[in-house]
Amino acid sequence: MPADTTKSPLAAGLLDIESLERSEIEAILERARFFQPLPNETYRRLDSLRGKTIVNLFFESSTRTRVSFEIAARRLGADTISIAAQGSSVSKGESLVDTLNTLVAMRPNAVVMRHSASGAPHFLAKHLQIPIVNAGDGTHEHPTQGLLDALTILDRRKSLENLRVAIIGDIAHSRVARSDIHLLAKFGAEIVLCGPPSLVPVELAELAPGVHISYYMKEAIRDVDVIMMLRVQLERQHEAPMAASEYFRFFGLQLEHLALARPEVIVMHPGPINRGRELSSDVADSQRSAILNQVENGVAVRMAVLERILA
Ligand code: NCD
Protein backbone atom coordinates (compact mmCIF):
# COMPACT_ATOMS: atom_id res chain seq x y z
CA MET A 1 0.00 0.00 0.00
CA PRO A 2 1.60 3.32 -1.00
CA ALA A 3 1.68 6.23 1.44
CA ASP A 4 -1.18 8.70 1.15
CA THR A 5 0.35 11.65 -0.70
CA THR A 6 -2.21 14.37 0.08
CA LYS A 7 -0.77 17.02 2.41
CA SER A 8 -1.11 15.76 5.95
CA PRO A 9 -2.33 17.91 8.86
CA LEU A 10 0.78 16.56 10.54
CA ALA A 11 3.12 18.40 8.16
CA ALA A 12 3.90 20.90 10.94
CA GLY A 13 4.56 18.15 13.50
CA LEU A 14 2.61 16.34 16.21
CA LEU A 15 2.16 18.17 19.50
CA ASP A 16 -0.89 16.60 21.10
CA ILE A 17 -3.93 14.37 20.59
CA GLU A 18 -6.45 16.91 21.85
CA SER A 19 -6.21 19.02 18.70
CA LEU A 20 -6.14 16.08 16.24
CA GLU A 21 -9.23 15.28 14.22
CA ARG A 22 -10.60 11.81 14.62
CA SER A 23 -10.08 11.23 10.87
CA GLU A 24 -6.37 12.01 11.23
CA ILE A 25 -6.07 9.55 14.12
CA GLU A 26 -7.75 6.91 11.97
CA ALA A 27 -5.39 7.62 9.07
CA ILE A 28 -2.32 7.26 11.31
CA LEU A 29 -3.62 4.02 12.81
CA GLU A 30 -4.40 2.58 9.39
CA ARG A 31 -0.90 3.32 8.16
CA ALA A 32 0.58 1.95 11.40
CA ARG A 33 -1.24 -1.34 10.81
CA PHE A 34 0.51 -1.57 7.45
CA PHE A 35 3.85 -1.27 9.29
CA GLN A 36 3.09 -3.91 11.93
CA PRO A 37 5.38 -6.90 11.34
CA LEU A 38 4.16 -10.49 11.11
CA PRO A 39 5.06 -12.71 14.07
CA ASN A 40 8.80 -13.50 14.05
CA GLU A 41 9.53 -10.80 11.51
CA THR A 42 11.02 -7.37 12.00
CA TYR A 43 9.65 -4.07 10.72
CA ARG A 44 9.89 -3.60 6.99
CA ARG A 45 12.70 -1.40 5.78
CA LEU A 46 11.58 1.34 3.42
CA ASP A 47 13.36 4.36 2.10
CA SER A 48 10.55 6.90 2.15
CA LEU A 49 12.58 9.16 4.47
CA ARG A 50 15.95 8.61 2.83
CA GLY A 51 18.07 11.77 2.98
CA LYS A 52 16.13 13.15 5.97
CA THR A 53 17.72 13.71 9.37
CA ILE A 54 15.74 13.47 12.59
CA VAL A 55 17.10 14.75 15.89
CA ASN A 56 15.84 13.03 19.05
CA LEU A 57 16.27 15.42 21.93
CA PHE A 58 15.45 13.94 25.34
CA PHE A 59 15.59 16.19 28.41
CA GLU A 60 14.07 13.43 30.56
CA SER A 61 14.98 9.77 30.85
CA SER A 62 13.48 7.36 28.39
CA THR A 63 14.12 3.83 27.18
CA ARG A 64 11.09 2.73 25.15
CA THR A 65 10.12 6.02 23.55
CA ARG A 66 13.62 7.06 22.52
CA VAL A 67 14.66 3.68 21.11
CA SER A 68 11.33 3.26 19.39
CA PHE A 69 11.51 6.66 17.63
CA GLU A 70 15.03 5.82 16.56
CA ILE A 71 14.15 2.40 15.15
CA ALA A 72 11.08 3.87 13.44
CA ALA A 73 13.11 6.61 11.72
CA ARG A 74 15.82 4.20 10.62
CA ARG A 75 13.32 1.67 9.26
CA LEU A 76 12.10 4.47 6.97
CA GLY A 77 15.62 5.23 5.82
CA ALA A 78 16.18 8.45 7.81
CA ASP A 79 19.37 9.33 9.66
CA THR A 80 18.92 9.88 13.37
CA ILE A 81 20.88 11.69 16.02
CA SER A 82 19.95 11.18 19.67
CA ILE A 83 20.86 13.71 22.29
CA ALA A 84 20.33 13.24 26.02
CA ALA A 85 20.30 16.53 27.93
CA GLN A 86 22.84 15.23 30.44
CA GLY A 87 25.53 15.05 27.77
CA SER A 88 24.67 18.28 25.94
CA SER A 89 25.24 22.01 26.40
CA VAL A 90 21.95 22.22 28.30
CA SER A 91 23.94 21.04 31.31
CA LYS A 92 26.21 24.09 30.71
CA GLY A 93 23.30 26.49 31.21
CA GLU A 94 22.18 27.03 27.60
CA SER A 95 18.48 27.94 27.28
CA LEU A 96 16.02 25.65 25.53
CA VAL A 97 15.49 28.12 22.68
CA ASP A 98 19.23 28.53 22.14
CA THR A 99 19.74 24.76 22.12
CA LEU A 100 16.98 24.33 19.57
CA ASN A 101 18.18 27.21 17.40
CA THR A 102 21.65 25.68 17.40
CA LEU A 103 20.31 22.32 16.30
CA VAL A 104 18.02 23.84 13.67
CA ALA A 105 20.99 25.74 12.19
CA MET A 106 22.38 22.31 11.23
CA ARG A 107 19.25 21.74 9.12
CA PRO A 108 17.68 18.55 10.41
CA ASN A 109 14.21 17.81 8.99
CA ALA A 110 12.39 17.23 12.28
CA VAL A 111 12.98 17.25 16.01
CA VAL A 112 11.48 14.67 18.37
CA MET A 113 11.58 16.02 21.90
CA ARG A 114 10.77 15.10 25.47
CA HIS A 115 10.82 17.79 28.12
CA SER A 116 9.77 18.09 31.77
CA ALA A 117 7.87 21.37 31.15
CA SER A 118 4.28 21.03 29.95
CA GLY A 119 3.91 23.03 26.73
CA ALA A 120 7.65 23.17 25.89
CA PRO A 121 7.21 21.65 22.38
CA HIS A 122 4.21 23.91 21.68
CA PHE A 123 6.26 26.94 22.62
CA LEU A 124 9.13 25.91 20.38
CA ALA A 125 6.83 25.03 17.49
CA LYS A 126 5.59 28.64 17.52
CA HIS A 127 9.12 30.00 17.25
CA LEU A 128 10.88 27.54 14.96
CA GLN A 129 10.26 26.59 11.35
CA ILE A 130 10.72 22.86 11.85
CA PRO A 131 8.28 20.02 12.55
CA ILE A 132 8.36 19.03 16.21
CA VAL A 133 7.12 15.72 17.52
CA ASN A 134 6.18 15.73 21.19
CA ALA A 135 7.61 12.63 22.89
CA GLY A 136 6.13 13.68 26.25
CA ASP A 137 5.87 17.18 27.75
CA GLY A 138 5.68 17.34 31.53
CA THR A 139 2.29 16.22 32.76
CA HIS A 140 0.52 17.39 29.59
CA GLU A 141 0.52 14.93 26.67
CA HIS A 142 2.38 12.02 25.08
CA PRO A 143 0.61 11.78 21.74
CA THR A 144 2.46 8.83 20.19
CA GLN A 145 1.76 6.82 23.37
CA GLY A 146 -1.95 7.58 22.96
CA LEU A 147 -1.76 6.37 19.36
CA LEU A 148 0.15 3.18 20.17
CA ASP A 149 -2.30 2.42 22.96
CA ALA A 150 -5.16 2.78 20.47
CA LEU A 151 -3.38 0.50 18.01
CA THR A 152 -2.88 -2.10 20.77
CA ILE A 153 -6.59 -2.01 21.61
CA LEU A 154 -7.42 -2.40 17.91
CA ASP A 155 -5.24 -5.54 17.77
CA ARG A 156 -7.67 -7.17 20.19
CA ARG A 157 -10.96 -5.39 19.42
CA LYS A 158 -12.76 -4.72 16.15
CA SER A 159 -13.12 -1.00 16.80
CA LEU A 160 -12.36 1.81 19.21
CA GLU A 161 -16.01 2.81 19.40
CA ASN A 162 -17.74 3.03 22.77
CA LEU A 163 -15.19 1.21 24.91
CA ARG A 164 -15.38 1.10 28.68
CA VAL A 165 -11.94 1.92 30.00
CA ALA A 166 -10.51 2.21 33.52
CA ILE A 167 -7.33 4.26 33.95
CA ILE A 168 -5.78 3.55 37.32
CA GLY A 169 -2.94 5.20 39.19
CA ASP A 170 -1.15 8.53 39.22
CA ILE A 171 -3.37 10.35 36.76
CA ALA A 172 -2.53 13.82 38.05
CA HIS A 173 1.03 13.55 36.74
CA SER A 174 0.38 11.40 33.69
CA ARG A 175 0.76 12.76 30.18
CA VAL A 176 -0.09 9.26 28.95
CA ALA A 177 -3.48 9.41 30.67
CA ARG A 178 -4.27 12.78 29.08
CA SER A 179 -3.42 11.60 25.57
CA ASP A 180 -5.36 8.35 26.05
CA ILE A 181 -8.37 10.18 27.46
CA HIS A 182 -8.51 12.66 24.58
CA LEU A 183 -8.10 9.93 22.01
CA LEU A 184 -10.59 7.42 23.39
CA ALA A 185 -13.17 10.13 24.16
CA LYS A 186 -13.14 11.08 20.46
CA PHE A 187 -14.41 7.53 19.85
CA GLY A 188 -17.15 7.72 22.48
CA ALA A 189 -15.40 5.85 25.30
CA GLU A 190 -16.70 5.80 28.83
CA ILE A 191 -13.62 6.33 30.99
CA VAL A 192 -13.29 5.82 34.74
CA LEU A 193 -10.27 7.37 36.43
CA CYS A 194 -9.21 5.72 39.68
CA GLY A 195 -6.46 6.20 42.24
CA PRO A 196 -5.86 7.89 45.56
CA PRO A 197 -7.63 11.29 45.76
CA SER A 198 -4.27 13.12 45.88
CA LEU A 199 -3.38 11.61 42.48
CA VAL A 200 -6.86 11.84 40.92
CA PRO A 201 -8.18 15.35 41.58
CA VAL A 202 -11.88 15.82 40.79
CA GLU A 203 -11.27 18.40 38.06
CA LEU A 204 -9.85 15.65 35.83
CA ALA A 205 -13.44 14.61 35.13
CA GLU A 206 -13.69 17.79 33.02
CA LEU A 207 -10.98 16.67 30.60
CA ALA A 208 -13.37 15.16 28.07
CA PRO A 209 -16.96 13.97 27.77
CA GLY A 210 -17.56 10.51 29.25
CA VAL A 211 -14.93 10.78 32.00
CA HIS A 212 -15.87 9.81 35.58
CA ILE A 213 -13.91 9.33 38.79
CA SER A 214 -14.01 6.52 41.31
CA TYR A 215 -11.76 6.04 44.30
CA TYR A 216 -12.49 2.31 44.52
CA MET A 217 -10.67 -0.18 42.29
CA LYS A 218 -13.42 -2.77 42.37
CA GLU A 219 -15.97 -0.22 41.26
CA ALA A 220 -13.72 1.28 38.59
CA ILE A 221 -12.95 -1.98 36.79
CA ARG A 222 -16.44 -3.45 36.76
CA ASP A 223 -17.35 -4.48 33.19
CA VAL A 224 -14.50 -2.62 31.52
CA ASP A 225 -12.91 -3.65 28.21
CA VAL A 226 -9.54 -2.11 29.00
CA ILE A 227 -7.61 -1.50 32.22
CA MET A 228 -4.74 0.95 31.87
CA MET A 229 -2.38 0.99 34.81
CA LEU A 230 -0.07 3.95 35.34
CA ARG A 231 3.24 4.30 37.12
CA VAL A 232 3.32 6.34 40.31
CA GLN A 233 5.53 9.20 39.11
CA LEU A 234 7.53 9.77 42.27
CA GLU A 235 9.80 12.20 40.41
CA ARG A 236 6.86 14.59 39.91
CA GLN A 237 5.35 14.32 43.41
CA HIS A 238 6.08 16.91 46.04
CA GLU A 239 4.45 15.21 49.02
CA ALA A 240 5.66 12.07 50.74
CA PRO A 241 4.30 9.16 48.68
CA MET A 242 2.26 6.23 49.99
CA ALA A 243 4.43 3.19 50.78
CA ALA A 244 4.54 0.75 47.84
CA SER A 245 2.82 -2.00 49.84
CA GLU A 246 0.01 0.28 50.98
CA TYR A 247 -0.50 1.64 47.46
CA PHE A 248 -0.60 -1.91 46.09
CA ARG A 249 -3.21 -2.96 48.66
CA PHE A 250 -5.66 -0.29 47.45
CA PHE A 251 -4.71 0.43 43.84
CA GLY A 252 -2.50 -2.44 42.69
CA LEU A 253 -4.04 -4.68 40.01
CA GLN A 254 -4.22 -8.33 41.06
CA LEU A 255 -5.49 -11.43 39.30
CA GLU A 256 -8.71 -11.62 41.29
CA HIS A 257 -9.64 -8.12 40.07
CA LEU A 258 -9.73 -9.30 36.46
CA ALA A 259 -12.85 -11.38 37.11
CA LEU A 260 -14.77 -8.15 37.70
CA ALA A 261 -13.94 -6.78 34.26
CA ARG A 262 -15.21 -8.12 30.92
CA PRO A 263 -13.91 -11.62 30.12
CA GLU A 264 -11.63 -10.44 27.30
CA VAL A 265 -10.29 -7.46 29.26
CA ILE A 266 -6.99 -6.00 28.04
CA VAL A 267 -4.45 -4.94 30.69
CA MET A 268 -2.13 -2.17 29.59
CA HIS A 269 0.69 -0.10 31.10
CA PRO A 270 2.93 2.39 29.28
CA GLY A 271 5.97 1.24 31.26
CA PRO A 272 8.26 1.33 33.06
CA ILE A 273 6.23 -1.00 35.32
CA ASN A 274 6.76 -1.42 39.05
CA ARG A 275 5.75 -4.95 39.98
CA GLY A 276 4.31 -5.11 43.48
CA ARG A 277 3.31 -1.44 43.43
CA GLU A 278 1.03 -0.90 40.41
CA LEU A 279 0.35 -4.50 39.48
CA SER A 280 1.25 -8.02 40.51
CA SER A 281 3.67 -10.09 38.46
CA ASP A 282 1.01 -12.65 37.63
CA VAL A 283 -1.12 -9.91 36.04
CA ALA A 284 1.84 -8.33 34.21
CA ASP A 285 2.78 -11.71 32.72
CA SER A 286 -0.76 -12.98 32.13
CA GLN A 287 -2.54 -13.68 28.85
CA ARG A 288 -4.60 -10.56 29.42
CA SER A 289 -1.54 -8.30 29.51
CA ALA A 290 -0.75 -6.32 26.35
CA ILE A 291 2.22 -4.48 27.85
CA LEU A 292 4.83 -5.80 25.43
CA ASN A 293 2.42 -5.41 22.50
CA GLN A 294 2.28 -1.73 23.40
CA VAL A 295 6.06 -1.50 23.13
CA GLU A 296 5.98 -3.37 19.83
CA ASN A 297 3.29 -1.10 18.42
CA GLY A 298 5.30 1.97 19.39
CA VAL A 299 7.59 1.43 16.43
CA ALA A 300 4.75 0.99 13.89
CA VAL A 301 2.91 4.06 15.16
CA ARG A 302 6.04 6.22 15.13
CA MET A 303 6.84 5.07 11.58
CA ALA A 304 3.36 6.19 10.54
CA VAL A 305 3.71 9.53 12.34
CA LEU A 306 7.19 10.32 11.00
CA GLU A 307 6.13 9.37 7.49
CA ARG A 308 3.05 11.61 7.63
CA ILE A 309 5.19 14.48 8.83
CA LEU A 310 8.12 14.09 6.48
CA ALA A 311 7.44 11.93 3.46
C1 NCD B 1 5.67 7.20 30.20
C2 NCD B 1 6.18 8.61 30.15
O1 NCD B 1 7.39 8.85 30.08
O2 NCD B 1 5.32 9.47 30.14
N1 NCD B 1 6.52 6.22 29.71
C3 NCD B 1 6.59 6.02 28.35
O3 NCD B 1 6.83 6.91 27.58
N2 NCD B 1 6.36 4.77 27.92
C4 NCD B 1 5.06 6.86 31.51
C5 NCD B 1 5.94 6.85 32.72
O4 NCD B 1 7.08 7.30 32.73
O5 NCD B 1 5.43 6.37 33.75
Image (cartoon, helix red, strand yellow):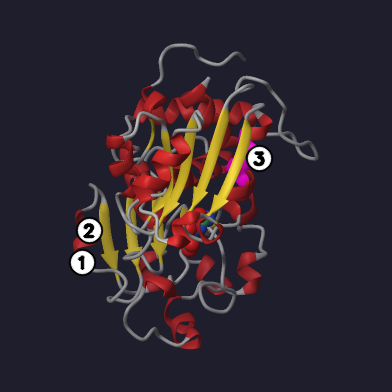
Q: Relative to 214, does residue 223 appear above or below in the rendering?
A: above
- Amino acid carrying mark 2 in the image: Ala
Q: Which residue is mark 2?
A: 205
Does the closest atom of ligand 1 sit within 8 Å of the Cβ of label 3? no
Q: Secondary structure at mark 1?
A: helix
Which residues, given as a range, are shown in magenta? 68-73
- Amino acid carrying mark 3 in the image: Ile
Residues at marks 3 and 1, CA–CA distance in whole angstroms? 39 Å
Does the closest atom of ligand 1 sit within 8 Å of the Cβ of label 1? no
Q: Relative to 27, does residue 259 appear above or below in the rendering?
A: below
Residue 216 x %, y %: 34, 74
Residues at marks 2 and 1, CA–CA distance in whole angstroms? 6 Å
Do labels 2 and 1 touch, CB within 8 Å? Answer: yes
Q: Which residue is mark 3?
A: 71
In what quadrant of the picture does the N terminus appear? top right
The disc placed on residue 202 is 1
